[in-house]
Image: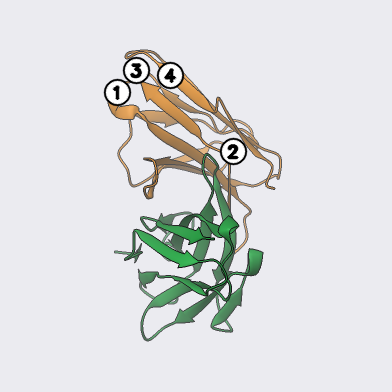
Amino acid sequence: AQSVAQPEDQVNVAEGNPLTVKCTYSVSGNPYLFWYVQYPNRGLQFLLKYITGDNLVKGSYGFEAEFNKSQTSFHLKKPSALVSDSALYFCAVRDMRNFNKFYFGSGTKLNVKP
Amino acid sequence: EADIYQTPRYLVIGTGKKITLECSQTMGHDKMYWYQQDPGMELHLIHYSYGVNSTEKGDLSSESTVSRIRTEHFPLTLESARPSHTSQYLCASAADRESGEQYFGPGTRLTVT
């Protein structure tokens, strides 16, 4: 089965500190991995994706993610958190047997305190 | 900001009513999706479409139906709403590119009383 897991329901970080939101995946073959952010009462917004190439992927709003094949991880990172980064973050993987389907993690709530 | 719209944004309706949730996109995307999401929880795929006149069921069993008569329009219908249908419904679209990142609408929060 293809899936992603987000082991932390919530991450708390102080403004200005680095942040990491964790994601691990389970797929057959090379994964297509995505991060999305959801602000209250809004739909999800695409942040970044890994398809192939450089393991460090840069995305919107200063976020980046590191693909680690040996650890089957795709953690989201930002060097310096902002209060406005507080939101719900979802990791997702594309179904490599049916390209039209995606599987989402359970989400991690990021709280950035001033 | 992606051009994908959902109406209504909020809906409170009684048990047994028929409802249709609207979703439209102006990006010309072939692929469209409906997800069900309980507040702050993971998304579950309930329907998707490759293009006009093609629809498929997702992984989550659903009593809803969808249609895709036009590229830009992908409505979801519940013939008889029940309290168990209370949830948030998110519509998304994706271009027919290999990477396939999705663009999401703002969602419809449905409450069935």
**Disc 1 on helix, strand or loop?**
helix
Chain in green (letter): A
**Disc 4 on helix, strand or loop?**
strand
| Residue located beneath label 3 in the image | B80
Q: Earlier in the sequence, mark 1 or mark 4?
A: 4
**Disc 3 on helix, strand or loop?**
loop
Q: Earlier in the sequence, mark 2 or mark 3?
A: 2
Q: Amino acid at mark 1?
A: Pro
Residue at 55 percent across and 78 percent down: it is A52
Q: Quick check: marks 4 and 3 in contact, CB under 8 Å? A: no
Residue at 36 percent across and 55 percent down: it is A106
Of A7 and B54, nearer the camera is A7
Q: Amino acid at mark 4?
A: Val
Q: Is residue B38 left or right of residue A60?
A: left
The subunit letter for the residue under badge 3 reads B
> Residue B52: which disc?
2
The CA distance from mark 2 to mark 3 is 26 Å
| Residue located beneath label 4 in the image | B12
Q: Amino acid at mark 3?
A: Ser
Dividing the picture into quadrants, the one containing residue A15 is bottom right
The CA distance from mark 1 to mark 4 is 10 Å
